[in-house]
Amino acid sequence: MHKKIYLLLSLILFTSTLFAQSVENDSISTYYLIRHAEKDRSDSTNKNPDLTESGFVRADNWSKIFDQLPIDAVYSTNYKRTLNTVLPTAKNNNLTIKTYHPFKIDIPQFIKDTKGKRVLIVGHSNTTPDFVNKLIGKEVYQDIDDTNNANLYIVTIKGEQIFHVLIKMH
């Protein structure tokens, strides 16, 4: 786990230095996007399941990673599994979780509203890659396999420059 944190911090530092040449830091926006942690699949009719025990452990592990990074805002879809995935991080950073609807969010307005901020966004196997693609303005990432809860997408925007990376945090 520690090696992954160091790798993540190194990537963040790298992206920050890429964009920090002569522009103030408040014009750099960084978005961290993850899928919710493992959900309870014991009742296939439940459309709003909570996390499994492993899911709560993963949520806590995510919070440890994000404790090393400054976060200004936290966004989640309005489901138990996404809210509980981001809850430890929000609590540790004294942030209120803002909910969003993945198919109704106005991405240009979202980018404008979060300019210069570091934002954690939690979604689903199909909505998270779609959100990343909308942030970067092109179709790069496919839906996440339903058994994969370990992807971390990082998008950094400075003016017209956009950097994006996918890290697998198994």
Image: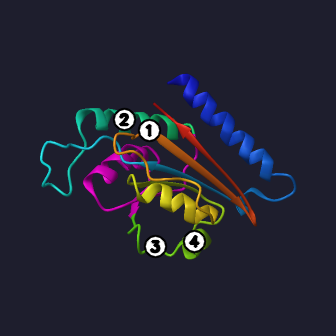
Amino acid on which disc 1 is placed: Ala
| Mark 3 vs mark 2, CA separation in Å | 27 Å
Q: Are marks 1 and 2 in contact (CB under 8 Å)?
A: yes
Amino acid on which disc 4 is placed: Asp
Q: Secondary structure at mark 2?
A: helix
In this rendering, is residue 54 above or below 44?
Answer: above
Pair 4/1: label in front: 1
| Mark 2 vs mark 4, CA separation in Å | 29 Å
Q: Out of 64 and 4, give the one closest to the viewer.
A: 4
Which residues are the magenta region? 69-98
Pair 3/4: label in front: 3
Q: Residue 116: x, y in percent?
A: 66, 62
Pair 1/2: label in front: 1
Residue under pointer 4 = 113
Q: In the displayed structure, does residue 27 sit left or right of residue 82?
A: right
Residue under pointer 1 = 150
Q: In the displayed structure, does residue 38 sit left or right of residue 75?
A: left
In this rendering, is residue 115 above or below 38?
Answer: below
Amino acid on which disc 3 is placed: Ile
Whether residue 67 is visible to the viewer of this picture, yes or no, is no
Residue under pointer 2 = 58
- The mark total stands at 4
Q: Residue furthest right?
A: 22
Residue under pointer 3 = 105
